[in-house]
Image: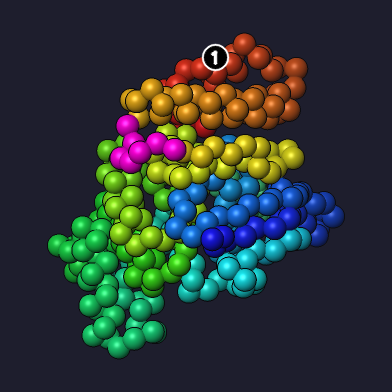
Amino acid sequence: MDHVIIKNVEKTFFNKEEKTSFTVFNDINLNIKKGEFLSLLGPSGCGKSTLLNIVAGLDKATNGVVQVGSKTITAPGPDRGVVFQEAALMPWLTVLENVMFGLKKKMSKGEAEKKALEYLKLVHLSKFIRSYPHELSGGMKQRVSIARALAMDPEILLMDEPFGALDEQTRSMLHKEVQFIWEQTGKTIIFVTHNIRESVILSDRIILMGTRPGGIIGEFPVNLARPRQPSSPEFVKLEEDIMKQLAGEIEKVMKEEMGDDYNSKKASLLYGSNRNMGEHI
Ligand SMILES: Nc1ncnc2c1ncn2[C@@H]1O[C@H](COP(=O)(O)OP(=O)(O)OP(=O)(O)O)[C@@H](O)[C@H]1O
Ligand SMILES: [Mg+2]
């Protein structure tokens, strides 16, 4: 069953003072199934956050519609929870109070506390409920913001590079936690990243986005059993296939930006077949 339906979505930013406009993408069509883990992958500036913000209702499409089931999205709503790259926690509230904040509007204080504790346990932060955000590491703050979004019990979780600022070990631990939570809760997840390996580890399907003109340039289903092994030949092959397609896209952008200085040999060395160098795009 399709859960999120993105139909003919265009986003153009207008600069009224300079009387200019910039179209990020002009015709995005994408259906996401209930319970699907979908990644949006693409180079910086291709419009991943813009698309996610439109689905979140934080930004408006210039044309086209986004539906959750049969309902057209016009604003943020409790059916969609958002986790951003930087955990936007309230510094004057404890971990527990941060997670309880939205819940208190929906239920009694006692019930809110019970629910908040349940979700803090799910992200392994039961020992830190009385701590303040400044006392936590980056990964712990991100876990609080994941708990806060989950506690509101949205049908859909929208995550915009939630682990982008974290070190490899923390990132890898949070991958395991997110997979566990996803398996436990059956949420539909749309996950933005520019890390190819992360998208292959986590997703059911990867959507590649490109720039100029922006839009969907490829789609890769990930039919590998979980937990995924980055060293397995199937994993490596998929990672390389994705990288090949993205390398072409990055080359296009470099050519445009560098003009005569463009050196295709250099570009292919940097972004071509070397798996480790190209992991982050
Ligand atoms: N409010 C805005 N006004 C004008 N242009 C904008 C605005 N927000 C985004 N853009 C432009 O839209 C394009 C897409 O931006 P977006 O933030 O969606 O990219 P992204 O794929 O999320 O990039 P990154 O990986 O760096 O986060 C960029 O060229 C950006 O400059
Ligand atoms: Mg972004």
Q: In this view, does 96 lie to the left or right of 155?
A: left
Q: Does the residue labelled 1 lie within 8 Å of ligand 1?
A: no
**Left-right relation of 235 to 108:** right
Q: Which residue lies furthest to the top in this view?
A: 265
Q: Judge whether residue 160 can be spotted in this image.
A: no
Residue 182: which quarter of the image? Answer: bottom left
Q: Residues within 10 Å of mark 1 (few under 14, many from 20)?
A: few
In the image, residue 81 lies in the stretch drawn in magenta: no
Q: Residue at x 68, y 30 (%)?
A: 253
Asked if residue 168 shows in the view, the reply is yes
75 vs 109: above or below: above
Is the N terminus in the top left, top right, bottom left or bottom right quadrant? bottom right
- Considering the numbered disc 1 on the image, is that residue within a helix, a strand or a loop? helix
Q: Mark 1 points at which residue?
A: 269
Name the residue at the bottom extreme: 108
Nearer-the-camera pick, 95 or 60: 60
Helix, strand or loop for the magenta stretch, by majority: loop
Position of residue 230 measured from the top left corner of the image (x, y, whole percent): 35, 29
> Which amino acid does the dot numbered 1 rest on?
Leu
Nearer to me, 182 or 192: 182
Which corner quadrant of the image does residue 64 belong to? bottom right
Q: Which residue shows up at 29% across the image and 80% down it?
A: 112
As drawn, 256 above or below 194: above
Residue at 46% x, 45% y: name it: 204
Q: Where is residue 270 in the image (x, y as percent from the top left)?
A: 53, 18
Q: Give the range drawn in magenta.
A: 223-229
Report x, y in % for residue 29: 68, 52
* View extreme (right): residue: 19
Q: Position of residue 77 (x, y in %)?
A: 52, 73
- Image quadrant in which you'd find residue 4: bottom right
